[in-house]
């Protein structure tokens, strides 16, 4: 617990510093603590340390944790690829889905929300900016088509964009991808595409979240820097 609190303070200090460099208040940036592979006990300690939002990669792994921790104090965000056969469970479990990547998945989530009597589900579109075969996301040239689908959805709330750039030892190498996502967000915001008006930017992880904030991130997804290396 002391180590977790110490790590969290370091991350929050870095968020504040990066926000100041970008001319924004630190509360303009939400921290999603990536809790994949970590136990409910560890997550409970994180809640006591003041963490309010947790990000999980896999629906099945998250189900047990959410059942134990609940939704009263925290939000649960799905940040990993969502398989179509897990869509119903994702609608039942998560507050926000960061990884919407196809019109087919959008139609399925919209239908399931109606069947589950869920009036609103916040979603971000994951954009593949590097064309990596190992990464999910809608290709940039297909983004507009997916956005048009979301405009017709009554229950999906299109609230932002997400990306995962190629891994790089130097965080500066990821800056170009964060900048491109911001430019896409700005264009869509001008067109009135986002339900929340401004459009979140979910980008940046433990090794590069400071660069992401400098480029406009409003949500950073940080795991290792808070919880330590996964075993």
Image: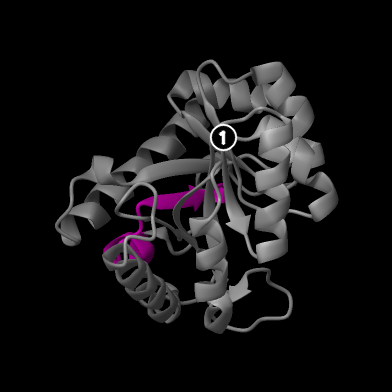
* Residue plotted at (57% across, 79% down): 142
Q: Position of residue 72 (x, y in %)?
A: 54, 15
| 145 up-or-down from 99: above or below | below
Q: Position of residue 130 (x, y in %)?
A: 57, 83
User: What residue is pinned by disc 1?
Assistant: 95
Q: Nearer the viewer, residue 21 or 227?
A: 21
Element type where label 1 sits in the image: loop
Q: Quadrant of residue 203?
A: bottom left
Q: Disc count in the image?
A: 1
- Relative placement, left or right, of 196 versus 108 is left
- Relative placement, left or right, of 147 versus 42 is left
- Region in magenta: 210-224
- The N terminus sits in image quarter: top right
Q: Quadrant of residue 154?
A: top right
| 154 up-or-down from 128: above or below | above
Whether residue 223 appears in magenta in the rendering, the answer is yes
Q: Position of residue 171 (x, y in %)?
A: 43, 73
* Residue plotted at (80% across, 54% down): 84
Q: Position of residue 209 (x, y in %)?
A: 41, 59
* Residue plotted at (31% across, 63% down): 189
| 166 up-or-down from 50: above or below | below
| 29 up-or-down from 139: above or below | above
| Residue extending furthest toward the left | 23
Whether residue 160 appears in magenta in the rendering, the answer is no
* Residue plotted at (79% across, 55% down): 83
| Residue extending furthest toward the right | 85
């Amino acid at each position: 617990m002391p180590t977790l609190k110490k790590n969290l303070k370091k991350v929050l200090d870095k968020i504040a510093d990066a926000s100041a460099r970008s001319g924004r208040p630190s509360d303009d940036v939400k921290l999603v603590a990536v809790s994949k592979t970590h136990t409910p006990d560890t997550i409970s300690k994180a809640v006591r340390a003041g963490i309010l939002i947790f990000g999980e990669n896999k629906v099945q792994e998250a189900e047990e944790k959410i059942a134990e921790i609940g939704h009263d104090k925290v939000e649960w965000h799905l940040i990993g690829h969502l398989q179509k056969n897990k869509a119903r469970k994702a609608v039942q479990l998560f507050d926000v889905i960061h990884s919407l990547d196809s019109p087919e998945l959008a139609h399925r989530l919209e239908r399931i929300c109606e069947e589950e009597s869920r009036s609103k589900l916040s979603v971000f579109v994951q954009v593949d900016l590097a064309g990596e075969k190992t990464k999910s996301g809608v290709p940039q040239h297909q983004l507009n088509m997916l956005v048009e689908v979301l405009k017709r959805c009554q229950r999906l709330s299109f609230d932002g964009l997400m990306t995962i750039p190629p891994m790089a030892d130097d965080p500066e190498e990821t800056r170009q991808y964060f900048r491109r996502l911001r430019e896409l967000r700005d264009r869509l915001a001008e067109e009135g595409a986002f339900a929340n008006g401004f459009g979140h930017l979910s980008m940046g992880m433990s090794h590069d979240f400071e660069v992401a904030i400098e480029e406009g991130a409003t949500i950073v997804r940080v795991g290792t820097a808070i919880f330590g290396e996964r075993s």
